[in-house]
């Protein structure tokens, strides 16, 4: 990717629409657009100030192609920090391609994926974590993931990391200065203030690392595995939640032989519900594969909904359900396990009391009639740690950031251990530089071409 040429790409989705927007950016963007744009006012586009929109016609040669709007942004007050022109034409695929081909023939280069945002990063319009948030914002499919991306695009935790990193650089420079006077036994860096800074950095890193479990789940959709024995109503519950016939429902045990998944949004948060094969002993080879997949999905899920047939919960069957629920809790201690007693519409008050005595956490519902389903949705929302979102606290959803934060925390811990053990300043400096490297990798103050290529390759063309 070059910074000194002019690039072009369609900034709106391809296909037929009312309008399409073609974006040009680079040192020759305004001149190139002006050579093919004739303003209705007669005013040359080169003389127009930034942040202005002009009606006119687009010509290639003597052929008038379309009536368009040309929006002018002059660098550095533009998205990329360069001169930018956005051509809003009619949304015919033919017109879009003709405009694109015309400017390519005139000397533009086709933009690569994410190149506009890459140029914004290279020109200091945003740091690297903010640039990554642009892609997350475009991909957000629910209110919570949108909120996380928007918060990060506005600076989020990266501004705080940058601030603490700058302070760490200050102490690193003082410790390096001490090395030049090692024979004189002097200290330029206040060890007490330095320790307090390390504690502050450590606390922030731990908080951000802990938020990743929630942030990543929200970004990808919180997986909820519906498990239980065959014919307890798992597929019916999935269909009721999704309000469509997504899974086959049958009285024949073992109908669901593979995991069926679908997404929905509850309270602005994405959930991915997984209907699994019924767990039982079977000689059927295909059903056995499905049961094995059930346990794989239970391991991947964030929440487990263990479903039972309430009408069968009495005597030994009720005790067996208690043992199965306890086994899931023991096997997945880090995950909430919801115990669902289905077919509540067929239960008497005495039966409910009997079930509650053995399974006090049981949630009664009727997957077929919808009784208790709304309350189940509320319970699911309550299990998701959204307090940070409501308080607008920073939440990490980027795997690259999570890895860098962990490495930075490890380096900070080494610094603290070294200082406590009286390690020489030159060795402490090594760990400080290690921490600075990983913190800088988050904000983009330390980058490589490979890193930038991997990040921006996941962007859409035109952004």
Image (cartoon, rainbow, N blue to C red):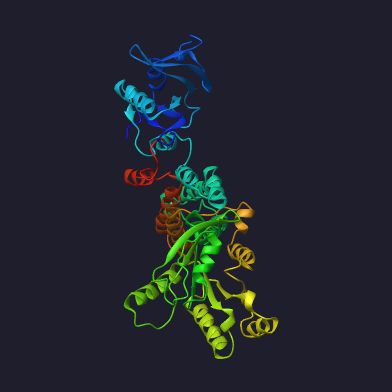
Q: Residue furthest bottom?
A: 316
Judged left or right of residue 386, residue 27 is: left
Q: Position of residue 373 (x, y in %)?
A: 61, 66
Q: Is residue 302 above or below residue 452?
A: below
Q: Position of residue 458 (x, y in %)?
A: 38, 45
The answer to whether residue 421 is seen in the rendering is: no
Q: Is residue 113 above or below residue 47?
A: below
Q: Which residue is nearer to you in this view: 341 or 199?
A: 341
Q: Position of residue 235 (x, y in %)?
A: 49, 68
Quadrant for the C terminus in the image: top left
Q: Residue furthest front?
A: 251
Quadrant for the N terminus in the image: top left
Residue 341: quadrant of the picture: bottom right
Q: Residue at x 60, y 62 (%)?
A: 381
The answer to whether residue 240 is seen in the rendering is: yes
Q: Residue furthest top?
A: 42
Q: Residue at x 53, y 20 (%)?
A: 52
Q: Position of residue 245 (x, y in %)?
A: 49, 61
Number of numbered markers: 0
Q: Which residue is nearer to you in this view: 447 or 163?
A: 447
Q: Residue furthest left?
A: 105
Q: Is residue 269 above or below residue 120?
A: below
Judged left or right of residue 356, residue 126 is: left
């Amino acid at each position: 990717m070059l910074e000194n040429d002019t690039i072009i790409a369609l900034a709106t989705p391809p296909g037929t629409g009312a309008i399409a927007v073609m974006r040009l950016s680079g040192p020759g963007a305004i001149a190139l657009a002006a050579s093919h744009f004739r303003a209705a006012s007669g005013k040359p586009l080169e003389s127009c100030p930034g942040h202005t929109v002009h009606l006119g016609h687009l010509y290639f040669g003597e052929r008038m192609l379309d009536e368009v709007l040309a929006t002018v942004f002059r660098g550095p007050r533009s998205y990329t920090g360069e001169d930018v022109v956005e051509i809003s034409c009619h949304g015919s695929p033919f017109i879009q391609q003709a405009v694109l081909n015309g400017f390519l023939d005139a000397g533009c280069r086709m933009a690569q994926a994410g190149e506009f945002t890459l140029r914004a990063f290279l020109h200091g319009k945003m740091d690297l974590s903010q640039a990554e948030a642009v892609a997350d914002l475009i991909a957000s499919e629910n209110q919570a993931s949108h909120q996380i991306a928007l918060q990060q695009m506005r600076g989020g935790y990266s501004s705080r990391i940058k601030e603490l990193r700058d302070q760490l650089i200050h102490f690193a420079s003082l410790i390096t200065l001490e090395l030049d006077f090692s024979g004189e036994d002097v200290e330029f860096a206040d060890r007490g203030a330095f320790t307090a800074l390390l504690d502050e950095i450590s606390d922030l890193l731990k908080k951000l690392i802990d938020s990743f479990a929630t942030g990543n789940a929200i970004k990808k959709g919180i997986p909820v595995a519906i498990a239980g024995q065959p014919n307890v109503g798992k597929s019916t519950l999935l269909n009721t939640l999704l309000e469509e016939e997504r899974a086959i429902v049958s009285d024949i045990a073992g109908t669901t032989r593979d995991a069926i998944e679908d997404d929905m949004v509850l309270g602005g948060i994405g959930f991915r519900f997984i209907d699994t094969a019924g767990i039982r002993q079977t000689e059927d080879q295909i059903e056995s594969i499905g049961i094995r997949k059930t346990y794989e999905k239970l391991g991947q899920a964030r929440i487990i909904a263990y479903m039972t047939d309430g009408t069968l919960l009495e005597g030994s069957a009720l005790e067996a359900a208690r043992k199965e629920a306890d086994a899931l809790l023991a096997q997945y201690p880090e995950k909430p396990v919801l115990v669902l007693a289905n077919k509540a519409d067929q239960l008497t008050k005495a039966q409910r009391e009997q079930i509650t005595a053995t399974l006090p956490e049981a949630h009664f519902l009727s997957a077929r009639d919808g009784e208790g389903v709304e309350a189940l949705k509320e319970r699911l929302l309550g299990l998701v740690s959204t307090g940070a979102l409501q308080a607008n606290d920073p939440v990490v959803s980027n795997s690259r950031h999570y890895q860098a934060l962990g490495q930075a925390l490890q380096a900070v811990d080494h610094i603290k251990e070294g200082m406590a053990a009286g390690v020489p300043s030159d060795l402490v400096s090594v760990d400080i530089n290690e921490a600075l490297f990983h913190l800088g990798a988050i904000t983009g103050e330390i980058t490589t071409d490979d890193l930038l290529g991997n990040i921006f390759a996941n962007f859409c063309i035109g952004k």
